[in-house]
Image: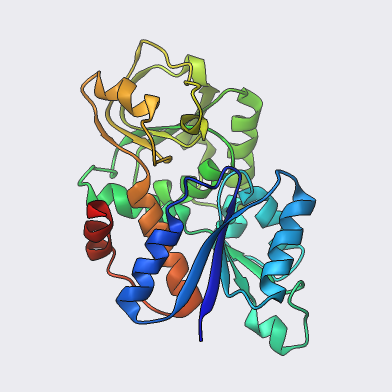
Amino acid sequence: MTQHFIVIGNPIAHSKSPEIHTLFATQTGIDIRYQRQYCPDDEASFIAVIEAFFRGGGVGANVTVPFKQVAYDCCLARGGLSEHAKVTGAVNTLLLNKTLLDNGASVAEAVYGDNTDGQGLVNHITSLSWPLDGAHVALIGAGGAARGVIMPLIESGIATLTIANRTLNKATDLVNELSNASPIINEQQIKTCRTAELSGQFDLIINATSIGLSDATLPLSAALNCQYAYDMMYGRTLPFLQHFAARGAQISDGYGMLIGQAALSFEHWTGHTIDVAQATKILNKS
Protein backbone atom coordinates (compact mmCIF):
# COMPACT_ATOMS: atom_id res chain seq x y z
CA MET A 1 0.00 0.00 0.00
CA THR A 2 1.27 3.47 -0.91
CA GLN A 3 2.24 5.66 2.04
CA HIS A 4 1.64 9.40 1.63
CA PHE A 5 3.93 12.23 2.79
CA ILE A 6 4.15 15.99 2.19
CA VAL A 7 6.42 18.96 2.87
CA ILE A 8 4.58 22.16 3.85
CA GLY A 9 6.07 25.60 3.24
CA ASN A 10 5.85 29.06 1.68
CA PRO A 11 7.69 29.23 -0.69
CA ILE A 12 7.80 25.53 -1.50
CA ALA A 13 8.37 25.09 -5.26
CA HIS A 14 12.16 24.90 -4.75
CA SER A 15 11.97 21.99 -2.28
CA LYS A 16 13.93 18.87 -3.17
CA SER A 17 12.35 16.82 -0.40
CA PRO A 18 10.21 14.75 -2.82
CA GLU A 19 13.33 13.69 -4.74
CA ILE A 20 15.16 12.81 -1.53
CA HIS A 21 12.40 10.77 0.06
CA THR A 22 11.65 8.97 -3.20
CA LEU A 23 15.28 7.82 -3.22
CA PHE A 24 14.95 6.71 0.42
CA ALA A 25 11.90 4.67 -0.56
CA THR A 26 13.86 3.03 -3.38
CA GLN A 27 16.69 2.19 -0.95
CA THR A 28 14.30 0.58 1.51
CA GLY A 29 11.92 -1.04 -0.97
CA ILE A 30 8.71 0.67 0.15
CA ASP A 31 6.03 2.43 -1.89
CA ILE A 32 5.53 6.12 -1.11
CA ARG A 33 4.15 9.30 -2.63
CA TYR A 34 5.77 12.50 -1.36
CA GLN A 35 4.49 15.90 -2.55
CA ARG A 36 5.12 19.61 -2.02
CA GLN A 37 2.29 21.46 -0.27
CA TYR A 38 2.05 25.24 -0.53
CA CYS A 39 0.27 26.90 2.40
CA PRO A 40 -0.76 30.54 2.93
CA ASP A 41 1.32 32.17 5.66
CA ASP A 42 -1.13 32.04 8.54
CA GLU A 43 -1.80 29.64 11.41
CA ALA A 44 -5.38 28.79 10.46
CA SER A 45 -4.36 27.70 6.97
CA PHE A 46 -1.50 25.59 8.31
CA ILE A 47 -3.76 23.77 10.78
CA ALA A 48 -6.34 23.18 8.04
CA VAL A 49 -3.68 21.66 5.78
CA ILE A 50 -2.24 19.24 8.34
CA GLU A 51 -5.63 18.14 9.65
CA ALA A 52 -6.88 17.46 6.12
CA PHE A 53 -3.69 15.59 5.28
CA PHE A 54 -3.74 13.26 8.28
CA ARG A 55 -7.51 12.72 8.14
CA GLY A 56 -7.00 11.67 4.52
CA GLY A 57 -4.61 8.91 5.56
CA GLY A 58 -1.29 10.78 5.42
CA VAL A 59 1.59 9.17 7.31
CA GLY A 60 4.03 12.03 7.86
CA ALA A 61 4.80 15.62 6.96
CA ASN A 62 7.88 17.80 6.91
CA VAL A 63 7.58 21.48 7.82
CA THR A 64 9.78 24.22 6.40
CA VAL A 65 9.83 28.04 6.59
CA PRO A 66 7.85 29.87 7.83
CA PHE A 67 5.81 27.28 9.74
CA LYS A 68 8.18 25.57 12.19
CA GLN A 69 7.05 27.54 15.23
CA VAL A 70 3.40 27.33 14.15
CA ALA A 71 3.84 23.54 13.95
CA TYR A 72 5.31 23.57 17.46
CA ASP A 73 2.27 25.41 18.84
CA CYS A 74 -0.06 23.06 17.01
CA CYS A 75 1.60 19.92 18.44
CA LEU A 76 1.85 21.41 21.92
CA ALA A 77 -1.94 21.74 21.91
CA ARG A 78 -2.53 18.32 20.34
CA GLY A 79 -0.50 15.12 20.19
CA GLY A 80 2.68 16.26 21.94
CA LEU A 81 6.34 16.96 21.25
CA SER A 82 9.66 15.16 21.40
CA GLU A 83 12.07 16.36 24.08
CA HIS A 84 14.23 18.05 21.47
CA ALA A 85 11.27 19.85 19.94
CA LYS A 86 10.20 21.03 23.40
CA VAL A 87 13.58 22.66 23.97
CA THR A 88 13.95 24.23 20.54
CA GLY A 89 10.38 25.45 20.25
CA ALA A 90 10.26 24.46 16.58
CA VAL A 91 9.01 21.42 14.65
CA ASN A 92 10.07 20.14 11.24
CA THR A 93 8.61 16.62 11.38
CA LEU A 94 4.96 15.69 11.93
CA LEU A 95 3.43 12.26 12.51
CA LEU A 96 0.55 10.79 14.47
CA ASN A 97 0.86 9.80 18.13
CA LYS A 98 -0.24 6.16 17.95
CA THR A 99 -0.66 5.89 21.71
CA LEU A 100 -3.22 8.68 21.70
CA LEU A 101 -5.00 7.18 18.69
CA ASP A 102 -5.19 3.79 20.43
CA ASN A 103 -6.70 5.53 23.45
CA GLY A 104 -9.48 7.04 21.37
CA ALA A 105 -8.10 10.42 20.33
CA SER A 106 -9.10 11.78 16.94
CA VAL A 107 -6.55 12.28 14.18
CA ALA A 108 -6.70 16.04 14.70
CA GLU A 109 -5.92 15.55 18.40
CA ALA A 110 -2.96 13.24 17.81
CA VAL A 111 -0.57 15.29 15.62
CA TYR A 112 2.91 14.87 17.14
CA GLY A 113 6.03 16.94 16.42
CA ASP A 114 9.78 16.39 16.38
CA ASN A 115 12.76 18.43 15.16
CA THR A 116 15.53 16.71 13.18
CA ASP A 117 17.08 19.88 11.70
CA GLY A 118 19.84 20.38 14.24
CA GLN A 119 21.22 16.86 14.14
CA GLY A 120 20.96 16.91 10.35
CA LEU A 121 23.09 20.07 10.28
CA VAL A 122 25.68 18.73 12.72
CA ASN A 123 25.89 15.41 10.85
CA HIS A 124 26.48 17.23 7.55
CA ILE A 125 29.11 19.59 8.93
CA THR A 126 30.89 16.60 10.48
CA SER A 127 30.79 14.76 7.14
CA LEU A 128 32.51 17.78 5.55
CA SER A 129 35.34 17.37 8.11
CA TRP A 130 34.73 20.88 9.41
CA PRO A 131 35.73 20.90 13.12
CA LEU A 132 33.03 21.76 15.64
CA ASP A 133 34.70 20.80 18.90
CA GLY A 134 36.09 24.01 20.39
CA ALA A 135 34.88 26.13 17.46
CA HIS A 136 33.75 29.75 17.65
CA VAL A 137 30.46 29.87 15.74
CA ALA A 138 28.15 32.66 14.58
CA LEU A 139 24.53 31.93 13.70
CA ILE A 140 22.59 34.53 11.70
CA GLY A 141 18.86 34.47 12.33
CA ALA A 142 16.61 33.87 15.33
CA GLY A 143 13.56 32.21 13.77
CA GLY A 144 12.44 28.60 13.63
CA ALA A 145 15.43 27.43 11.60
CA ALA A 146 17.88 28.87 14.13
CA ARG A 147 15.94 27.49 17.08
CA GLY A 148 16.24 23.97 15.73
CA VAL A 149 20.03 23.92 15.52
CA ILE A 150 21.26 25.73 18.64
CA MET A 151 21.04 22.82 21.06
CA PRO A 152 22.72 20.26 18.74
CA LEU A 153 25.51 22.77 17.98
CA ILE A 154 26.20 23.19 21.69
CA GLU A 155 26.04 19.42 22.18
CA SER A 156 28.67 19.05 19.45
CA GLY A 157 31.23 20.80 21.68
CA ILE A 158 31.52 24.30 20.20
CA ALA A 159 33.31 26.82 22.45
CA THR A 160 31.13 29.89 21.82
CA LEU A 161 28.03 30.85 19.89
CA THR A 162 27.06 34.33 18.71
CA ILE A 163 23.49 34.77 17.50
CA ALA A 164 22.99 37.75 15.19
CA ASN A 165 19.58 38.98 14.11
CA ARG A 166 18.14 42.06 12.44
CA THR A 167 16.09 42.65 15.60
CA LEU A 168 18.30 42.27 18.67
CA ASN A 169 15.43 41.62 21.08
CA LYS A 170 14.39 38.54 19.13
CA ALA A 171 17.88 37.06 19.48
CA THR A 172 18.14 37.78 23.22
CA ASP A 173 14.63 36.45 23.83
CA LEU A 174 15.56 33.26 22.01
CA VAL A 175 18.62 32.71 24.20
CA ASN A 176 16.59 33.32 27.35
CA GLU A 177 13.90 30.87 26.27
CA LEU A 178 16.34 28.10 25.36
CA SER A 179 18.47 28.51 28.49
CA ASN A 180 15.32 28.17 30.59
CA ALA A 181 14.30 25.08 28.63
CA SER A 182 17.58 23.14 28.86
CA PRO A 183 20.40 23.06 31.43
CA ILE A 184 23.04 22.46 28.74
CA ILE A 185 22.33 25.85 27.13
CA ASN A 186 24.38 28.33 29.13
CA GLU A 187 23.53 31.98 28.57
CA GLN A 188 27.14 32.91 29.31
CA GLN A 189 28.27 30.76 26.37
CA ILE A 190 26.02 32.63 23.92
CA LYS A 191 26.34 36.24 22.81
CA THR A 192 23.81 38.23 20.79
CA CYS A 193 24.04 41.21 18.45
CA ARG A 194 22.38 42.82 15.45
CA THR A 195 23.31 41.29 12.11
CA ALA A 196 25.00 44.46 10.86
CA GLU A 197 27.11 44.57 14.05
CA LEU A 198 28.45 41.04 13.75
CA SER A 199 32.21 41.32 13.19
CA GLY A 200 35.52 39.62 13.87
CA GLN A 201 36.95 36.21 13.04
CA PHE A 202 34.87 33.05 13.46
CA ASP A 203 35.64 29.44 12.69
CA LEU A 204 32.16 28.91 11.26
CA ILE A 205 29.30 31.24 10.28
CA ILE A 206 25.87 29.76 9.58
CA ASN A 207 23.07 31.61 7.81
CA ALA A 208 19.75 30.43 9.27
CA THR A 209 17.63 33.06 7.52
CA SER A 210 15.67 32.52 4.31
CA ILE A 211 16.97 35.71 2.73
CA GLY A 212 18.97 33.71 0.18
CA LEU A 213 15.72 32.63 -1.50
CA SER A 214 15.10 36.22 -2.58
CA ASP A 215 17.32 38.81 -4.26
CA ALA A 216 17.99 40.54 -0.92
CA THR A 217 21.33 40.33 0.87
CA LEU A 218 22.34 40.35 4.51
CA PRO A 219 23.95 43.52 5.91
CA LEU A 220 27.33 41.91 6.58
CA SER A 221 30.18 43.90 8.09
CA ALA A 222 33.41 44.26 6.11
CA ALA A 223 35.17 43.23 9.35
CA LEU A 224 33.43 39.82 9.46
CA ASN A 225 35.46 36.76 8.42
CA CYS A 226 35.41 32.99 8.84
CA GLN A 227 37.12 29.79 7.80
CA TYR A 228 33.87 28.01 6.99
CA ALA A 229 30.52 29.45 5.82
CA TYR A 230 27.30 27.43 5.74
CA ASP A 231 23.93 28.54 4.36
CA MET A 232 20.97 26.44 5.46
CA MET A 233 19.20 27.37 2.21
CA TYR A 234 19.90 25.60 -1.09
CA GLY A 235 18.69 25.33 -4.64
CA ARG A 236 20.05 28.57 -6.11
CA THR A 237 23.12 30.82 -6.05
CA LEU A 238 23.38 32.17 -2.51
CA PRO A 239 24.93 35.64 -2.03
CA PHE A 240 25.93 34.75 1.56
CA LEU A 241 28.17 31.96 0.31
CA GLN A 242 29.52 34.01 -2.58
CA HIS A 243 30.49 36.74 -0.11
CA PHE A 244 32.58 34.45 2.07
CA ALA A 245 34.00 32.38 -0.79
CA ALA A 246 35.48 35.61 -2.14
CA ARG A 247 37.15 36.02 1.26
CA GLY A 248 38.75 32.58 1.09
CA ALA A 249 36.28 30.58 3.20
CA GLN A 250 35.23 27.02 2.48
CA ILE A 251 31.49 27.02 1.80
CA SER A 252 28.48 24.72 1.71
CA ASP A 253 24.78 25.15 1.14
CA GLY A 254 22.18 23.27 3.15
CA TYR A 255 21.44 20.43 0.75
CA GLY A 256 23.43 17.96 2.86
CA MET A 257 21.59 19.12 5.97
CA LEU A 258 18.31 18.59 4.13
CA ILE A 259 19.29 15.01 3.31
CA GLY A 260 20.41 14.37 6.88
CA GLN A 261 17.30 15.71 8.57
CA ALA A 262 15.14 13.97 5.98
CA ALA A 263 16.75 10.62 6.78
CA LEU A 264 15.90 11.07 10.46
CA SER A 265 12.31 12.01 9.61
CA PHE A 266 12.00 9.01 7.28
CA GLU A 267 13.17 6.71 10.07
CA HIS A 268 10.54 8.16 12.43
CA TRP A 269 7.80 7.55 9.88
CA THR A 270 8.78 4.15 8.50
CA GLY A 271 11.25 2.56 10.90
CA HIS A 272 13.83 2.26 8.09
CA THR A 273 17.40 3.56 8.58
CA ILE A 274 18.95 5.36 5.58
CA ASP A 275 22.52 5.14 4.32
CA VAL A 276 22.98 8.92 4.15
CA ALA A 277 26.44 8.83 2.56
CA GLN A 278 25.22 6.64 -0.30
CA ALA A 279 22.06 8.71 -0.73
CA THR A 280 24.07 11.93 -0.86
CA LYS A 281 26.35 10.57 -3.59
CA ILE A 282 23.35 9.59 -5.72
CA LEU A 283 21.49 12.86 -5.19
CA ASN A 284 24.52 15.01 -5.92
CA LYS A 285 24.80 13.30 -9.33
CA SER A 286 21.13 13.77 -10.21
Of the pair 184 and 200, the residue shown nearer to us: 200
Numbered-mark total: 0
Quarter containing the C terminus: bottom left
Residue 163 in percent (x, y) is at 49, 31
The residue drawn where x is 20% and y is 22% is: 248
Q: In this picture, is 240 found above or below 266?
A: above
Q: What x and y, as percent, mark residue 33?
A: 49, 71
Front residue of this view, candidates 266 and 9 = 9
Placement of 264 over or under 107, stated as above or below: above
Q: Which residue is drawn at the image coordinates 29% and 40% (left, top)? A: 134
**Where on the picture, by quarter, is residue 7?**
bottom right
For residue 40, side relative to residue 199 (left or right): right
29 and 70: which is toward the camera = 29
Q: How is the image coloured?
A: rainbow
Q: Does residue 156 show up?
A: no
- Using the rendered view, name the quadrant where residue 245 is placed: top left
Instruction: Report the residue that reaches farthest toward the top.
Output: 222
Q: Can residue 243 be spotted in the picture?
A: yes
- 3 relative to 239 in the view: left or right: right
Residue 218 locus on image (x, y percent): 48, 21
- At horizontal 75% and vertical 45% (from top left) the residue drawn is 42
Location of residue 20 by image quarter: bottom left
Relative side of 151 to 22, left or right: right
| Percent position of residue 162, x then y | 45, 30
**Residue at coordinates 47% horizontally, 75% vertically from top-left?**
32
